Amino acid sequence: DQFLYPDKLYNPSYHWESTRKTELALEFGLFNDRVLFSPVYFRNISSNQLVNYKLPKMTGFNEVVANLPATVVNDGFEFTLSSDNIKRKDFSWHTDVNFSVPRNKLKAFPDIENSSYYTTYVVGKPLNVIYLLDFLGVNPETGDPMFLDVNKDGLLNTDDYVPTGTLDPKFYGGIQ
């Protein structure tokens, strides 16, 4: 006997996400183009993010493909430097260096406070924000750590977490 079992939950309302891209680039050549330098600014605005939306186990499925009503901005700068250091008949040496400064932030997420992403994302902050208790120091009398009670309810829990940083790199680069 063979049976067919559904693998994924059907969602008739999901659709392609959309991205608007802007890029401004210049390229400079020096010494008969043996040295090339290119600064680039980019800005991508994406909306209707496609995600695997987590579902309660009682549904029989772990997730469903859905669109988030969020708008995300990715922008930054990229710099490239290429040079022909030595260029001879029997030997050549070429160097490429790149350096990137990327940023992203959640520009908008209508009704985020009523979504399951309320404790994950903050409008105006990067997507990979780190949430922790705000450390105020050590109590000199007891030696215990002190943390900010954001909602002033006398308890320290996830309601008191604040954005403290991001997992995104400030910059990265490479050389070849």
Image (cartoon, rainbow, N blue to C red):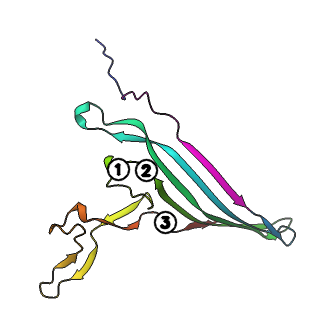
Badge 2 crowding class, 10 Å Cα cut-off, few under 14, some 14 to 19, many 20 or more, is many
Residue interval drawn in magenta = 9-25
Numbered disc total: 3
Q: Which of marks 2 and 1 is nearer the N terminus?
A: 2
The disc at residue 169 is 3
Q: Give the position of the N terminus as an image quadrant.
A: top left
Q: What secondary structure is marked by label 3?
A: loop
Front position in the image: 111 or 101: 111
Q: Name the residue under label 2.
A: 109
**What is the x, y in percent for residue 24?**
70, 59
At 58% across and 60% down in the image, what residue appears?
75
For image coordinates 84% across by 67% down, the residue present is: 33
Q: Is mark 2 on a helix, strand or loop?
A: loop
| Marked residue nearer the N-terminal end (1 or 3) | 1
Cα–Cα span, label 2 and label 3: 23 Å
Q: Which part of the image, by quadrant, shows the C terminus?
A: bottom right
**Residue 66: x and y, percent?**
42, 37
Indicate left or right for 56 with 66 as reference.
left
- Reply above or below: 58 against 76: above
Residue 165 rendering spot, x and y as whole percentages: 39, 68
Q: Are dots 2 and 1 in contact, CB under 8 Å?
A: yes
Q: Identify the residue position indicated by label 1 in the image.
A: 117
Amino acid type shown at disc 1: Tyr
Does the residue at mark 1 contact the one at mark 3 (Cβ under 8 Å)? no
